[in-house]
Image (spheres, rainbow, N blue to C red):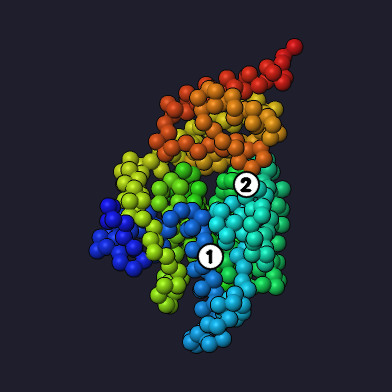
Amino acid sequence: MLVNRPALGVFPSTEWSAVLEKAFMRVAPAGLDMVFTTAHGSDANELAFKAAFMHHAHKRRGARALSDKELASVMDNQEPGAPDAAIVSFSHGFHGRTFGALSATRSKAIHKLDIPAFKSWPRVPFPQLQYPLDKFSAENAIEEKRCLDELERVLRTHPVPIAAIIVEPVQSEGGDRHASPEFFRAIRSITRELDVLMIVDEVQTGCGATGTFWAHEQWDLPEAPDMVTFSKKMQAAGFFHTRQLVPDQAYRNFNTWLGDPPRALLAQAIVDEVLEKNLVGQTRLVGEYLKSHLLPLAIRYHRLVSSVRGHGTFLAFDCPTPELRAEFLELMRKEGVNMGGSGDRAVRFRPMLTLTKTHVNVFLTRLESVLNKMYQKYWPRN
């Protein structure tokens, strides 16, 4: 299984089901009892879209057999065999760089430039929350309602049928933008009412970094999303789904490899380590410790640090301008701290799950050193 890569889509080994169970199903999101393994995060979202479109067409077709017209027209990319249908995504979202995933991506123009897109796929606004949350609760509720109203309007009136929506728990490429659990519960209610599938893209947030194994666990949804995609920290990729999304014919959602056994074994070892050492719980506690120190720094250095936010160690804050953020990140790298940006102004934290309070204390010393240097440069005391 390791030396000679098996064609899992055709000839899975006798051990493959046990590998899937140990690597993925023991941490499967509640309510999702199947997993489809893929090569990478973009691939996971792409194949989730295919599952959504097949399910949508199956509902429309009902029990009847495929027609000769469907089978002929699809070879020319025409209806009815190639029906017009769409995926709804959110402004500032990022879902990958393959064709379907890129059509759903709305974060940076350079990602999409020159690439043909599915032009009927609509986007809807994602909330821009104000911080601190307790100070702006009324304003944020209005903002979230505005976005939900637009989502419902699009789902009800878009001229092209909507098969699914896709949403990230945190818009990790688009500026570390968050929304409340109530917002996501409302999305689940709207999609259920209008018979639209809900795909949660946990490619970046999955595997414990937010203080729960899956970030959407924190939403307390009335029922599970229809699909959850994953990759990144799992060192393997795919999507969890409900049994109803299995196509009724073989070779529909398919490729030769359907993932990779070595990657699945890596995922199994990672899950073993995460569960045995309670790294999700550690991440939650260490994240609370880190955030408790970032919040007062945002007061002391308010000209540089604002809008501290996040869960677990999946944290971020904003700098006032892209230029100041670039300078800040460069100075942090010179201090030996590898940090990155998100969106136009956000600085994001993406440490390993093994981060401890000792590591945080070392980081905070270097962070404050850089903040002091920048204050002395731009806002020297008289």
Q: Identify the mark at residue 174; answer none if there is no mark.
A: 2
Helix, strand or loop status at disc 2: loop
Front-most of 225 and 334?
A: 334
**What is the distance, in whole Å, between disc 1 and disc 2 at their CAs?**
21 Å
Q: Residue furthest left?
A: 14
**Percent position of residue 72, x then y:** 55, 83
Residue type at mark 2 is Gly
Residue type at mark 1 is Phe
Pointer 1 with pointer 2, Cβ within 8 A: no
Q: Residue furthest right?
A: 382
The quarter of the rendered structure image containing the C terminus is top right
Residue under the image location 41 percent in, 72 percent down: 251
In the picture of the structure, the residue carrying the numbered disc 1 is 49
Is 364 placed above or below 244 here?
Answer: above
Q: Earlier in the sequence, mark 1 or mark 2?
A: 1
Crowd tier of the residue under label 2, counting other residues whose Cα lies within 10 Å: few below 14, some 14–19, many 20 or above: many
Q: Quadrant of residue 27?
A: bottom left
**Percent position of residue 369, x then y:** 57, 19
Residue under the image location 62 percent in, 23 percent down: 371
